[in-house]
Amino acid sequence: MRIFARHHSLSIQARLTMLALVTALPLVVLAGFAMLRTVDDERAQAQRDVRDRVEGLLADVDRQISAIQAELQVLALSPSLQTGDFPAFDQQMRAALTIRGTSIVLHDTHAQQLLSTNRPFGEPLPQATNREMHDRVVETGKPQVSDLIIGAVLRRPILTVGVPVFRDGKVAYVLAMGLGPEILSALLQEQNVPPDWTAAVFDRKGLIAARNRELERFLGKPAAPMIRKKMAGAVESWFPNVTSEGIPVYSTFRRSPITGWTVAIGLPREFVDDIPALAGLAAKALPKKLSHVGFVVHNQDADAHDAASAVAKCVRGRRIVNSVNSSARLSTSMVPPCCWVTIAPLSSAGQRGPSARWMTSFRSAGR
């Protein structure tokens, strides 16, 4: 009986190891849950940041269009236009074009161009090839914007903003400014959108009217199938998408009540789904969320790296940490504030790798 008891008695080292594991396990579990919560917070923050950027871009585009409408409405009140002094009004149009826009054109109510900054005064001009915006201005007597069209004179894709010119209370002319897609694209680029993100403006038909990169390649092409389907609905949400280049992204969009155009941003999925990167942000954020005691994982060698990664797993099966690039201090109130817990590999000569034993050492925080 004494032999059996001696055979099954635990050595001091084994007892210490068990004590270390029992002591450290709650801290590791707490750290895992805290890391999971912080990673989820980082994901939610990324979504909020993208939505804020989309709303900012949409506001900039709407301000640009509203400014053009205001400029055209002031120009429409010109006495030279009201009296039919076209030579004088032609000069005024050309002067106004230096502020913004690609061209300014004066149409009659049948879409015949009367004056155009694209041609010298007095030169014959064609009829507008796309009358949809023009006819809406005549019918409603209100400013309107077009979808992406081919200019009758420029013969290239443009967007147009039109306002009515009234005479005796009726629409007598339509004054329109053409806006090249490169102008809106430059507006997107001015917002410092990261170069690997995709920002675009879609017209009401879902065609690409502006883009922060590779505009020439994608101008006038339909939106990618997934975002086109989402834009057809009323919900403006965060969803997985694939860009026209074939890049997996998470997209969100907003539709303008002024133009009916849609501004969208695609954030590469690898950024949002890169748990190690988010865990790194989480590790930096955790000291703000927890207090009293620090739990430090030391990246002393590759084995410690692997072990720390394996330990910090979500209970739902998702890996929280795949790499430990630096010491991550995770606070908890489960032990007195005078103690620090350090987990490190205990290796003997010839014993390394995944089978290396682990120990927990306690030291005074004031030491």
Image (cartoon, rainbow, N blue to C red):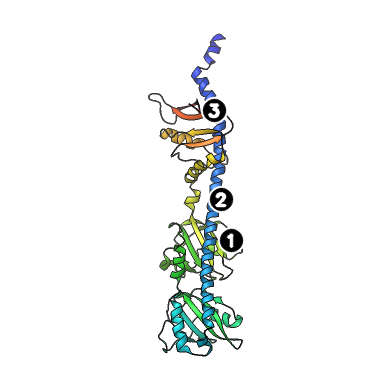
Q: Are marks 3 and 2 in contact (CB under 8 Å)?
A: no
Helix, strand or loop status at disc 1 = loop
- Mark before the other along the chain sequence, 1 or 2: 2
On screen, 72 above or below 7? Answer: below
Inspect this view and state whether residue 231 appears.
Answer: yes
Closest to the camera, between mark 1 and mark 2, is 2
- The percent coordinates of residue 184 (x first, y second) are 47, 68
Residue drawn 49% across and 56% down? Answer: 267
**Label 3 vs label 2: CA separation?**
35 Å
Quarter of image, res 216: bottom left
Question: How many badges with numbers are in the image?
Answer: 3
Residue under label 3? 338
Mark 2, other Cα within 10 Å: few <14 / some 14–19 / many ≥20: few
- In the rendered image, the residue lying farthest to the top is 2
Side of 233 relative to 126 (left or right) = right
Residue under label 1? 236
Amino acid type, label 3: Cys
